[in-house]
Amino acid sequence: MNEMPIEEYLAQGGRLTSPGNVPPRYRGELLRLMASFVDSELAASAGFADVINDAPGITSRIAAARIVLEKADHAERVLKVMAEFGADTSRYVGTHPWAARVARDADIGAVRQGGDMRLAVFHYPLAGWADAVVMNVLQGAAAVIQLQEYGRISYQPLAEVFRAIAPREARHAELGRAGLAQIMETAPDQVRAALEYWHPRVALGFGQKGSERFAMLKRLGLRHRPNEDLLAEWQSTIATQLAEHDLKVA
Amino acid sequence: MSRFHPLEVTDVTHDTRDSVIVTLRAPDGEAFRFIQGQYLTFRRDFDGQEIRRSYSICSGLDDGTLRVGIKRVDGGAFSSWANDNLAPGDVLEAMPPAGNFHVPLVPDQARHYLGFAGGSGITPVLSIIRTVLTREPKSRFTLVYANRQISSIMFREELEDLKNLYLGRLTVLHVLEQDAQEIELFTGRIDADKMAALFTHWVDPKSVDVAFICGPEPMMLTIAAALRDHGLQDSQIKFELFASNQPGRLKQSAKAQAQAATGRSCALSVTLDGTTRALELPLDGTSVLEAALGANLDAPFACKAGVCSTCRAKVLEGEAEMAVNHALEDYEVRMGYVLTCQCLPLSDKLVISYDE
């Protein structure tokens, strides 16, 4: 038969389709990537749950509740793919305290905390409704870009899940922008303060420039565009969105 | 977690010289209800070593049967055994159907599916064809089917019968490596030129809703690249790669040399991405993963709680135990796999590889 090393197949854009044809390093990196996504979604969902009661109107309460619901649902969908590799889904959710946060003024950089794989930004606490909305606008735009990237991932069952999730995450970001427009009418100063707090923290989630890990993930087809490209796209998207409200970040 | 079920073999048909079609009696209930394009994973003990092999279901949803096609692989223990020895009345142990090589059916839509199969890659594609023909009465299917020669074409007559039964809805284009055919498109291997010719003379790429590809890796790459070049999106292209990464050839498993833990540290050898490092692992509850990370090795991990299986590695020498294991199955543990985040040495030497 036409035997081809799996690494070469992947480097040429091949797709893997089941746990049975996944080589060891690929398996480890794929599970890590999924765990990071699941943990981030669970932490985001848990963090936003507290915010529902801060929401000023019924529409915004529904929006916040919807974000809480759907992010948990997205975590579950990816966890199902992890389960095919042996992950114990029933125990997984109890592994880490998803609602736990560090102090507002702690500086943890981009470092993961303990065994919890959520992005560092999800370790910081939300401080009220305006703060939560701004965080959601910024992280929502980041999620849209990251999900575009993940929709091309070489593990086909996961790429399909990400492509199904992407429009709903995009909707969460839209809800954030609608909320932002409202708050700008009443409390623009709170928005400016929140922007200053969240913008650098969300930016860190895109990872390092010239990352060696990226090169390895690219060979495996688990990543395609470098961190700095995704970051630049996010910065320009956010700049455009903020300009609508005459807002700027440093 | 998935379990194995005993399934009785009701029929074994030799389809070509080196393939058999095996019909199984599905147990009552929901467990073996399948989706078109899925596969079954079988296990069997060969001289004390358990081998697992996955084979695609080739039945359609409305066939009322559960059939798999098994092509003989050179030196393959399971496929050889199935081709030579399997007979009606035998019992095979199988896990419930798995895999997602399909798109949801929409009965009232008129879709055009394009399928590419190489050799035994026809099995899941046949399941999809049979299902689409009955469940989506307005849809049609074009199959491009590559084989070495006429005598190695699996399901050749069955495909002919389907073509006649569903007149005009199933088109089959055979591509043969060896036997010369009248049109050049149909001889040789599928390459970019053949794909271009296919899209010029036979198939309008704009008419294609979904493409399925199952075959050897280089063939899948060539076809997927051509499909993208002709305007198909990634979401319209479904790959199925054979699940064959597990060693199917029989070999002696390495015997662990149990040594009592005498000293206060363990000589730990860790292989990762082809490089081996020697480390000292203190016997104070430090896990293998922590030792590896502490030595700046880029070992994979995620939950550190024994539930996610990201940090899986294999013990090649020495003895170890896991504090917690919620992710590995018994057979993986028997093969020597451990969750390194939970792995503590019991011997004063431990050889671990993340590359197995």
Image (spheres, coloured by chain):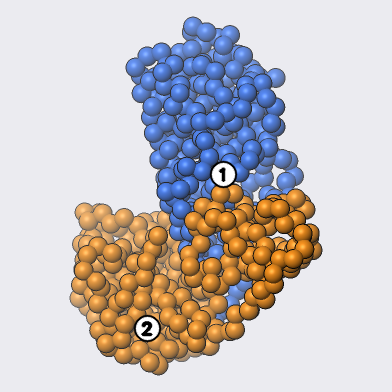
Position of residue B266 in the picture relative to residue A93 (left or right): right
- Indicate the colour of chain B: orange
Q: Nearer the viewer, residue B151 or A88?
A: A88
| Residue A244 spot, x, y in % from top left | 54, 17
Chain of residue at mark 2: B
Type of amino acid under label 2: Met
The residue at the point 43 percent across, 41 percent down is A74
| Residue A44 spot, x, y in % from top left | 50, 32
The residue at the point 36 percent across, 86 percent down is B20
Name the element at disc 2: loop
Confirm or deny contact between disc 2 and disc 1 (CB under 8 A): no
The residue at the point 41 percent across, 13 percent down is A56
Type of amino acid under label 1: Ser
Q: Which residue is mark 1?
A: A36
For the colour blue, the matching chain is A
Q: CA distance from mark 2 to mark 1?
A: 43 Å
Q: Would you say residue B295 is visible in this rendering? A: yes
| Residue A178 spot, x, y in % from top left | 44, 20
The residue at the point 53 percent across, 72 percent down is B334
Mark 1 Cα-neighbour bin, 10 Å: few <14, some 14–19, many ≥20: many
Q: Nearer the viewer, residue B116 or A22?
A: A22
Q: Quadrant of the C terminus of chain B?
A: bottom right
Q: Which residue is mark 2?
A: B154
Chain of residue at mark 1: A
